[in-house]
Image: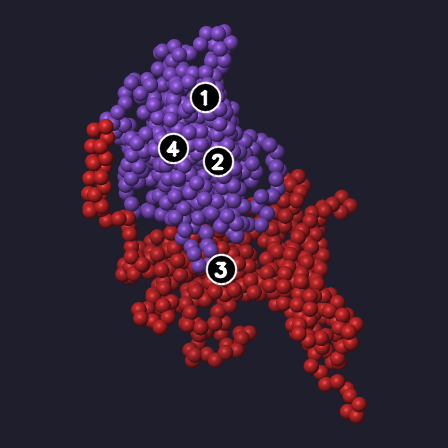
Chain colours: A purple, B red
Amino acid sequence: MERISSHQFMTLGAAVLMGTTFFPVASMVTTVGGRDSWMSVLPGLAVGIPYGLMVISLLEQYPGRNLLQISETLFGKWIGKIIGVLYISITGYFGGLLLAQAGDIYETSIMPLTPLGVFYLGGLLLVFYLVNSGIEVFARFSEVIFPLIVIALVLNVGLSIPRMEQGELMPILSEGFKPLFLGGLKVVPFAMEYILFLAGILPFLATDKQVLGQLKTGVWRAVFLVGFLDTMVVLIQILVFGPAETIRLVYGLLVLGKMVEISRTVAGVESLFLGVWLGALVIKVCAFFYTVTWGLDTVFKLKGLKWNLAVGVIFMVIAFRFKRGPSLIMEIGIVDNYLILPFASAWILTLWGASRWKKGTGDS
Amino acid sequence: MKSISQLKRGLIGILIVCLMLLPGCWGKREVEELAPLLGVGFDLGEKTGTFVITFQFARPTKGAASGAEIKDRTFGVETSSVREAIEKISKITYRTPFMGSLKVIIIGEEVAKAGGFNNMLDFAQRYSEFRRSMYLVLAKGKAQDILRLELRSELLPAMATKNIIEGGDEISSFPMVRLGHYLTILGTTSTAPILPVLESVKPGEGLEYKADGNDEAGEIRIQGAGVLRGDRLVDFLTDEETKGYMWLENDVVHRLINTVDLKDEEKENAKFGGQVLTSRTKYKVQNNNGKIELQYQINTSIAIDEVLGLKKPLSGPEWVELGKGAEKSFAKVIEKECESSLKKQRELGLDFLGIGRHIEQKNSAYWKTIKDDWEAEIKDFPISLDVQVTVHHSGMSSGSAVNPTVEGQE
């Protein structure tokens, strides 16, 4: 069995948690949270910390097994299988939607005439290579790409500072805390996507006591790092565009990238940013490809090249079904809010509760 | 293992085939095939619902002495949508119009007064090639007339406009409005957008120069601004009112300022010209005996570089007093400009100074009680000014060049 280090777990987790959340997050949270929405991002993502710690505690209790296997142990074979089928369906469908989003982002912003299939196929080829190379290669890929993603984000945010409008952040908390709560709710599904990935990766993690401590640290470090970066992304968009425009812009960060100018000489650097962020898309799609393959292996004992190819075809079919950008964005929101959020939050909580109860009764 | 190596070989094969067969990026265009768009003008069309859209493209010249030399290629089309206009233009130009280079959008006076030009701007904020950093200006008269001018500077009008706007920080006498800023202001409920006004200048219209023989203007300038309700022009601001706006909006970077027009009680007093070195405008919303009011606090540093009407050499103490007198005079000028801007805002009942937003920022609870009637409130909302000027120095000389009265001369 392959193993990844605790550092790789942290960077891979952060990369999966971040994924392409920095594209829609500002518009999503500002729609419900208004001017103060930037304050809701970190608390919303922080919901992932207790859930992440629950997953690590399950790993501690059931070393070498993923949460689907643990579910079968705790809830029985058939309930475990049903959970597994739900897990495969939800993550598979969401992975296909993310692949479609790669096409939407690039077609909308910099390559309007390139056929969508080229983005899907190009992205999927990279994903396929990473899946077939194993989790260790995927983790190393993330270790190399994630810092570049962060640098591109920081540069985009930093170079947008001269475009800030006066006083757009004020007044603070004029509508009280309710908008923050609503904004936070919009972000929680991002954390649950991360938790679904953690659910499958457990067998690739070491379980000695020192490493378990490092894994727990890795969870909250990943959440805080991504929370801070996404907060900065929302903050700069509100400061530059104001809340009304932030809501209206589909991919506000790309619009910011287009506005970057250095000494009125260097412009058009958004393509460089988008090149780096392709890595973020690939990591996120790859993570969900992995969850499907782990699910198929656990529930139906299906693994190997032909099943990976089948998953790839399904991803492509889903992506091609969503050529209409607005429908795609709506669908991602629906899957996030009405499938991933309730499924992951209820499953992990119930599983953890059941494991504690069984541990208490001494029946494990 | 065998299947993985077969997969790798298969993938490499696919990549080689792709490299040979695919042309690279779809829609790839070489830079020589592009017609860079520099300026767009919108005027009212003759038919209802149509606009005359003028496109100013750059035509780079081959073999020019300087690589940056470009010639004019300007077209006007009457259509009801920008895409339709580009289609018509594309039938004429052999190059592909490239929108990413657009520097300035000029809104003609008639179309601004009629309203509805946001429909024309929609393409610029939606199509991915455009950048929100392009500038927006209002034209005095028709936008197409300005874009078709042959300027004495030999610059294309769109480039000349861009250069004037970007040099605007040196004089801070008109606002610099980018498309992004306009859209942000449009998104606020209380603030009225404002755009700088571009006009052609013929000899004798406040400027003398040798005309080229035809009746057309050879120069353009930006002076004053237009106040909008949504996307409809309501009124123009004078130069003085616009300068007041610049102070109150904390938009003054450097200003050239003089006290020549100041009506002074003592006619013997000297007049000053100077340059603003730094300026900062803050505001506070305060409760004055139960009445909420807004106070602007303008702090400005000025260097005197011109003194008029000084008839005798100054002693040291007189030199110090001269500087203090200049500070008061400059403060009066700034107050006068601000007052004229505030007066205009009250007359129009439109909050182009963003006072509503200032109140919202500082006292959101109070703002919620007045925001629904804000346009009515603007007319008598109490506003006060506190202008502080510090003269840093009076240039390289302590006194003016005067002929001192010496012994025997009388």
Q: Quadrant of residue B406?
A: bottom right
Image quarter where the N terminus of chain B lies is: top left
Q: Which residue is mark 2?
A: A226
Of circles 3 and 2, the one toward us is 2
**Cα–Cα gap, marks 1 and 3:** 67 Å
Marker disc for residue A208? 1
Lower position in the chain sequence, tag 1 or tag 4: 4
Q: Check disc 3 and report its element: helix, strand or loop.
A: strand
Residue A227 point in image, percent of width and height:
51, 35
Of circles 4 and 3, the one toward us is 4
Of circles 1 and 4, the one toward us is 1
Image quarter where the C terminus of chain B lies is: bottom right
Marker disc for residue A139? 4
Q: Chain of mark 2?
A: A
Of circles 4 and 2, the one toward us is 4
Can you see residue A346?
A: no
Marker disc for residue B137? 3
- Is the Cβ of the residue at disc 1 closer than 8 Å to that at disc 3? no
Q: Residues within 10 Å of mark 2 (few under 14, many from 20)?
A: many
Q: Residues within 10 Å of mark 1 (few under 14, many from 20)?
A: few
